[in-house]
Image: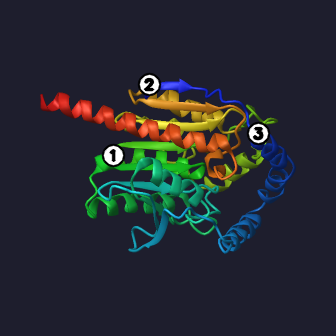
Amino acid sequence: MRINKDVAPDYPLSWQARALTSVMWGTLKPASSVLMRHPLALIGAARLGELAQLMPLRLPEHAVVAPAEGPDCGGEWVRAGRVDERKALLYFHGGGYFSCSPRTHRPITWRLSAVARRPVLALDYRQGPVHPLADSLADALDAYECLMRNGHAPEDIVIAGDSAGGHLTLATLLALRDRGLPTPAAAICLSPWADLTDIPRRANRWHDPMLPAGRVRWLARHWTCGLDPWDPLVSPVHGDFTGLPPLMIVTGSTEVLRDEARRVAERAREAGVPVRYEEWRRMPHAFPILADVLPEARLAFRHMSAFLEAVAARAARRGHSTAA
């Protein structure tokens, strides 16, 4: 696989995708329009998310979940199949910084463990409405340093996240670089929320089946209250990506967040970072979490596997050249 490339996978749109996006249009999008209007609604949505964690989730027999112990590495370890324990993938779940958990995102984390052939640490980072963005970032940095203290070399670590977790992935990379800490081997961002400035989102405003553009803008205002929204750690799309590792960005063509994902790819390339940007036709926001029902989502994990293999091959070539 070529890493530094824009790709628009041209798989035929599945009937499952057609049906699911229709359902989203009639349920999730109207619900989001109602919920994301008042801070109290965020509290209620967070409580509903806690109840959702009580629902049973089926995992394949080869996938094992274990609690992650320690104050800096709270969350869960997910292992699927044979994994290399010398390596690790640090995952930040999405949910707008107010909902979801490592448990809700197991459809992603167990598959990432399988395709990356390494254990996944799904971090249970602090979220709003109780905690600000700075607390989430502090937890992410602590977890990364915890992995290094436990013997994982930076070149054996990959960071990934979806939506708000994609935002946290980018902010973590920028913060590591700015602090003079070694960065991981690569990062994967699924539908990253990368711009929290007060901009109107006109692209795909009427095409996104899941997220209302106005409500995303409201949520951005809520989390950036008292902050500088142009700070790269708040809006990573405005950061300098110099010195960051290879990135893979996966988004849907009809998402309201699509354009900021594109802009991240462009800015990273301008800074010399290899970027694999994949824009999947008519896929909903953070669609890999729907891999249990969407064939396209399952295919996306194959692409992630190929990306990680290409990153490893690139690192091996560079190491060989340096040794020579």
- The residue positioned 12% from the left and 28% from the top of the image is 324
The residue that disc 3 covers is 208
Dot label at residue 270: 2
Q: CA distance from mark 2 to mark 3?
A: 28 Å
Secondary structure at numbered mark 3:
loop
Amino acid at circle 1:
Thr
Amino acid at circle 2:
Glu
- The residue positioned 40% from the left and 74% from the top of the image is 69
Pick the residue in front: 251 or 237: 251
Image spot of residue 276 (x, y percent): 48, 31
Pick whichever of labels 1 and 3 is earlier in the sequence.
1
The residue that disc 1 covers is 183
Q: CA distance from mark 1 to mark 2?
A: 19 Å
Tell which tag, 2 or 3, sits nearer the viewer. 3
Please tell me whether residue 102 is drawn above or below residue 182 in the rendered image.
below
Image spot of residue 129 (x, y percent): 64, 66
Is 6 displayed left or right of 36 in the figure? left
Residue 309 makes an appearance in the image:
yes
